[in-house]
Amino acid sequence: MRINLLLAAAALAFWSYGAPAPAAIALWVGAFWLLLTATLMDFNLRRSRDLSWQLLTILLLLYLIAAAPERHGILVWVWAAFFLLPQSRMMLTFNVLGAAVSWVLVALATPMAQALMLLLALGVLSLLAYAQSRKLVDVHGSSVRQRLRLIPGLNLWPAEQLLRDLNREQIRAKRENIHAEVMIVHVKRHQLWSCAQRLCNLTHAFESVYRLDGSSLAVLLLCTDPHDMNERRQRLCSALPGDTRCQYVALSELGSEPITIKSLTRQSVAIDAPRECCS
């Protein structure tokens, strides 16, 4: 990624030679921005929520096309590439407006027939690109968002993932004849993350811990039989602070009714009430 940014910065700087003054300024700004990004940016797998880099890209592209539509009209096709990126509704709106303004600027400098063909081709490509991005989000995005680790390197997941995992683990427990339980841990707010890390360290790699809310955690436990589960449950409870309340419910007791986070964190009539496992 860093090398690509440096190469893009060099390409913009090279393209600035012979360009009109307004376009040259925009090209040099873009080159400097890419160089600064490549030099200072800390690259990781987390997508930044800061939209400034996306907005700056849109503004630079619009400025380049507006400064010299005859010379930079080819850049209008970049908008189709923008629609390939997963984006929020706000950024999608900005991209649509930017593509429309860019087409108007280029259309004013080209014959009407060519402008209409450009509009048709750009619209089709943009729709195909957006459809592809939505397909990727539908296939991968939802599961990636739901399974985003709350602490890198630990099996700590959001509460929504527990609902997705319960059905799968119920089926697996029946198929493999193993005992599966959800242990619910109520802690003080300032103890939540330390207890979550401790539970992650004490559970197996194939088990998961979930943050239900600001003071509750859930642990999905798997054992060969109820006796082993009882011993594991007691060990986990004893490793937590003394004022922690722990409850549990076997997955076999949940039934086939839809399960919600509230029905697990309180003694609901929708499922068997979780039993106290330690005080």
Image: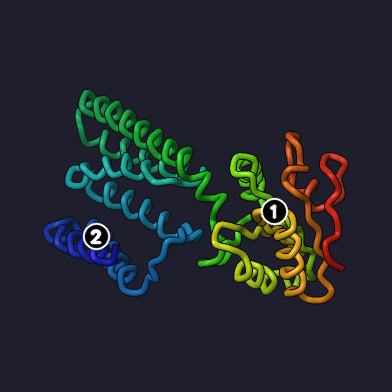
Q: Nearer the viewer, residue 226 or 64?
A: 226
Of mark 2 and mark 1, the one earlier in the sequence is 2
Q: Amino acid at mark 1?
A: Asp
- Left or right of 264? Residue 131 is left
The tag on residue 27 is 2
Q: Is residue 116 visible?
A: yes
Does residue 96 sit above or below 50 in this rendering? Answer: above
- Left or right of 139? Residue 244 is right
Q: Which residue matches tag 1?
A: 225
Distance between mark 2 and mark 1 Cα atoms: 67 Å
| Residue shown at 45% from the left, 60% from the top | 52
- Left or right of 75? Residue 222 is right
| Residue shown at 74% from the left, 54% from the top | 226
| Residue shown at 27% from the left, 25% from the top | 116
Does residue 174 sit above or below 200 in this rendering? Answer: above
Assign the N terminus to one quadrant of the image: bottom left
Picture quadrant where residue 197 is located:
bottom right
Picture quadrant where residue 234 is located:
bottom right
